[in-house]
Image (spheres, rainbow, N blue to C red):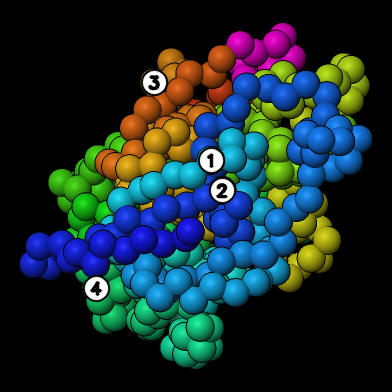
Amino acid sequence: MLCARTGKRGGRGRPAQHRVVINDDDLITSLAHTTPEPPIKNATTPRNPKNPQKKAPRRAAAATTTANGSAASRRAAPALVAAPRRAARRSRSVRVQAYKVAVLGAAGGIGQPLSLLLKMNKLITELRLYDVAPVVKGVAVDLSHCNTPVRVSAHAGDAELPGALAGADLVVIPAGVPRKPGMTRDDLFAINAGIVRALVGAAAKHAPGAIVEIISNPVNSTVPIAREVLKAAGAYDARRLLGVTSLDVVRANTFVAEAKGFDTRDVDVPVIGGHAGATILPLLSQSRPPADFGDADRAAMTKRIQEAGTEVVEAKAGAGSATLSMAYAAARMAESTLLGLAGEPGVVECAFVESDVVPGCAFFASRVQLGPQGVAKVHGLGDLNDFEKAALDAMLPELQAQIAKGIEFARSPPAPKA
Ligand code: LMR
């Protein structure tokens, strides 16, 4: 059921291709978000058609397989993560390239759990772990003992960065320092801006065709920095640079599900704007299933989603920011990206990309459709209610300033190394 391998290899230097047939019930380790079905009224838990009072049994077993799609050694496995929306239960068949993914900052708080989730991804055959910290070698050894077929390699320090990047299809960048209580994401700019500039510069040189996904904060500025660096290197393609904002969607889905008693896997709330404070704007009016909020509850829910990162920073009390939920959200984004590359139709995520959706805002997070070249389509915002329109107007100056700050930094010459 999971894999029917053709066994064909691509041309010289091209990765093997095989066809994977994915039934949605198999998507136990799959996080990708495909276009949801039309809104479901009231009940959000799948029901048993013979007895509508009884919930449909949930399939607890997952199939595991080898990375190249062979063997199909399947066994029952616990559900580790649930796909955000599995309402559209159907079989899909995608032609899969054997993807190579590089994680830059792989030994860090986000990098480690992200690498673990990617090690479980059946679209990936090679996972390159890069970090300035030598412990990345140990992280790779540790991860390599997991009996999934993804090959893991370690790359420590500047000299080994080209090896991590060469031929990568997707480069995910969580590198950088996290917030401490009392800090904004913008307070990280002084350190993380330079880190992102250097890493994207290396990606431009050694993986010029790769899709680059940036997690490092402040995303509202680091993504514009990345664009400038890629442009200067002649390697920029707007379809291939994305800021990861899927954690805002993951949080919105979770909080709305909790508030409304929905099954969280069925909830989809688009979150637009950017990834910092007031620039994070959940469109609760477009929630699926529809979720009604009175004025006070709408404002409180919006605030909770906007401040969710700070909630984690404060709870960790100086020991960092969100790592596990960020890794989860970034793994979902990576998987969606790879499914898009593989030709899976209807893969949609919210991401912070170059956009003309909001005049005067060169980058904006909105729903994007992912395809074989990266971002295939940037969707418009749909209908906003008055609360959302006002919040959008109010956030724009802040978002524009953060974008401009990144561009200005990238265009100024880097400080000489001490
Ligand atoms: C988050 O949203 O959790 C991350 O951007 C980390 C942070 O500093 O809040």
Q: Report how many numbered discs are placed on residues in the image.
A: 4
Which residue position holds label 3?
356
Magenta span main SS: helix
Q: Residue at x 41, y 26 (%)?
A: 378
* Pointer 3 with pointer 4, Cβ within 8 A: no
* Pointer 2 with pointer 1, Cβ within 8 A: yes
| C-alpha separation, residue under disc 3 versus residue under disc 1 | 34 Å
Label 3 amino acid?
Asp
Callout 2: 10 Å neighbours few (<14), some, many (20+)? some
Nearest the eye: 358 or 84: 84
Image-quadrant location for residue 325: bottom right
Which residue position holds label 2?
24
Q: Nearer the viewer, mark 3 or mark 2?
A: 2
Question: Quarter of the image containing the C terminus?
Answer: bottom left
Q: Which mark is residue 162?
A: 4
Q: Is residue 246 above or below residue 62?
A: above
56 sits to left or right of 383 = right
Q: Earlier in the sequence, mark 3 or mark 4?
A: 4
Residue 110 visible, this angle: no
Label 4 amino acid?
Pro
Which residue position holds label 1?
90
What x and y, as percent, mark residue 417?
A: 32, 71
Circle 2 SS class: helix
| C-alpha separation, residue under disc 4 versus residue under disc 2 | 37 Å
Provide the residue span drawn in magenta: 383-393
